[in-house]
Image (tube, rainbow, N blue to C red):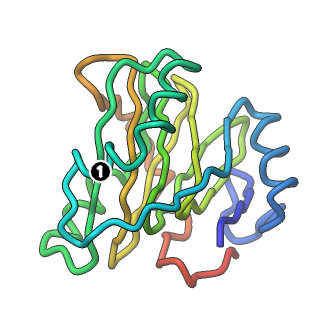
Amino acid sequence: MTHLTVYRDHDPSFPELATRDLIVLVGHLAMTGILFERWAASHSLPHDAGSEDVLAAYATDVARLQAARGYKTVDVARVPRGVANAADLRAKFLDEHTHSEDEARFFVEGSGAFYLHIDRRVFRIVCETGDLLSVPAGVRHWFDMGPDPHFTAIRFFKRPDGWMAEPTGADIAARFPGYEGPTASPR
């Protein structure tokens, strides 16, 4: 289940807040400028579905968000359970970074955890099927897909060249609890 855990950025051992209450989660994130919405992810996707299949299944939702927020490019990030290079894929996103544009993701399958470093706090949002998260440009963050990743997310971009990360060089991500999978509870 989707949940939010908030830590002070210097103390990952004791969360200030841990909640699965959607109203509290949305409100807390909205106060920091983060968009979080629950959408219907009602299309079953076959194991071998490609990007075109995913985008076709969610074409109405994709078009609505593109029109509302000015996204020009969309793609699909799909990591099936049991992928051979899981550790390498996980490591690619575990360092704190920023982007020069919003990072918007709609999870249509599976789960993963975004960690947002804002105002001396780290907000850990475990996103699952049906979650839309948009992180504003310039927000320091990292993403953990867990040791046995499984997710499909539609990614939205204003830039035609898509995902471009700017590492911060900070080691903060290594100090916080990693995402261990959908049954892991916040701590």
Residue linked to disc 1: 77
Q: Name, please, the residue furthest toward the left.
A: 84
- Where on the picture, by quarter, is residue 5? bottom right
Looking at the rendered structure, the secondary structure element under dot 1 is strand
34 shown above or below 50: above
Q: Amino acid at mark 1?
A: Ala
Nearer-the-camera pick, 23 or 145? 23
Q: Name, please, the residue furthest toward the bottom.
A: 183
Name the residue at 34% across, 51% down.
93
Name the residue at 55% across, 64% down.
128
Label 1 CA crowd tier, 10 Å (few <14, some 14–19, many 20+): some
* Number of numbered discs overlaid on the protein picture: 1
86 shown above or below 25: below
Nearer-the-camera pick, 117 or 146? 146
Q: Is residue 156 left or right of residue 82?
A: right
Name the residue at 37% across, 50% down.
57
Name the residue at 76% across, 70% down.
14
Q: Is residue 114 left or right of residue 87?
A: right
Measuring from the top left, give residue 187's x and y in whole percent. 70, 76
Nearer-the-camera pick, 1 or 125? 1
Measuring from the top left, give residue 70's x and y in whole percent. 49, 15
Measuring from the top left, give residue 118's x and y in whole percent. 67, 37
The quadrant the N terminus occupies is bottom right
Measuring from the top left, give residue 25's x and y in whole percent. 79, 54
Nearer-the-camera pick, 2 or 49? 49
Q: Is residue 164 left or right of residue 179?
A: left
